[in-house]
Image (cartoon, helix red, strand yellow):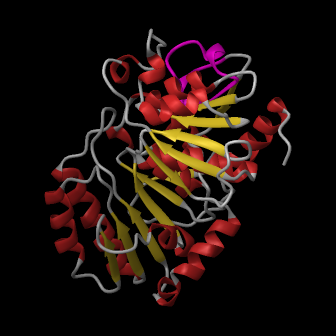
Amino acid sequence: MQRNGISAKNDATTATWLLTDGLAGNQRQASALALALGRAARHWVLQPQAPWRWLAPRRLPGADRAFGEDFAQALRGERPPLTIGCGRQAALATRLMRSDVTRAVQILDPRIAPSHWDLVIAPEHDGLRGPNVITLLGSLNPVDDLWLAGARKTFPAFGQLPGPRTALLLGGSSAHARFDRAAFDALASRLAAQLDREGGSLLATTSRRTPADTRARLRERLAALPQVSWYEPGEGANPYPGLLGWADRIVCTADSVNMLSEAAATRAPLFVFGIDRVEGRPRRFIDSLLGLRRAHAFDPHLRAYPVTPLRETARVAAEVRRRLSLND
């Protein structure tokens, strides 16, 4: 178990505990909710042990030892008024934390009855419903006008690049998405043709799901274009916020609900590449974005359209505050 305090207020009686498995997407959602609630936060990165890591969030005998001695001691000590978890492993931890003193909020479908938590926050495309379930389109994220302004201030160099600035957010294959070399080659060709006709700049970032050989091939192909900024994980400070802040339009692969949600929270037109390569719950979310006209399918023209940002986090936080009678 690793504890990672990000606030000066880390006392158990005041800080909200954020419990995740350390995956960036889960940490980001839990942090976004705490930020929207205006609460000081203390991060715990869970390291579940067998057999609980296989069976979470089911509460078997001895589950108080599922995350090591530090967490077991925390359960015996003074608990916070609120704990927020995200992901299946965290669902067991928030369930253990719940008490007369501590309200437990679980983000994402825990795959067992929501009644084990005070509130469960789940994407609409998961289909989870219940009296203590709050649904939202997409995923929780921190993107709003203030966040975007901060991103532009942190990465001012992108603002000097010629427009239109196209942000390219690249993911890869997943349990619900199939992207092969041919798909990425087609994307590169269409983007190259568009920039050749129109000019402007390309700001590209990859993710951990983007295969190394795909990253190398795309980087080589797009390097010939003028005004290309390319980032891969591990190459210094991640400019991802700057890409969203300065983008005149965004092209995003269809595999990541988190990336699509954050792109949809900006004021830039969003174009989704590879829709037909995605199925299941992520496809249902994309269909919702298309139905709301917040996103369009990727096409050779990338024409601008009127945008209403999709910002669910503030609404969800207000509902959490109301239902749990939380003070600001």
Residue range corresponding to the magenta coloring: 108-129
Query: Is 253 displayed left or right of 291 in the figure?
Result: left
Query: Is 203 displayed left or right of 261 in the figure?
Result: left
Whether residue 137 is in magenta: the answer is no
**302 w.r.t. 83: above or below:** below
**126 w.r.t. 299: above or below:** above
Name the spot of residue 3 as percent of width and height, x first: 48, 48
Find residue 235 and report its image quarter: bottom left
Find residue 102 and report its image quarter: top right
Q: Is residue 311 visible?
A: no
Taking depth in this image into account, of 27 and 83 the one nearest to the observer is 83
Residue occupying the point 52% across, 31% down: 73
Query: Is 132 displayed left or right of 167 in the figure?
Result: right
Q: Hey, which residue is sitting farthest bottom in the picture?
A: 160
Taking depth in this image into account, of 111 and 47 the one nearest to the observer is 47
Taking depth in this image into account, of 238 and 328 the one nearest to the observer is 328
Taking depth in this image into account, of 215 and 233 the one nearest to the observer is 233
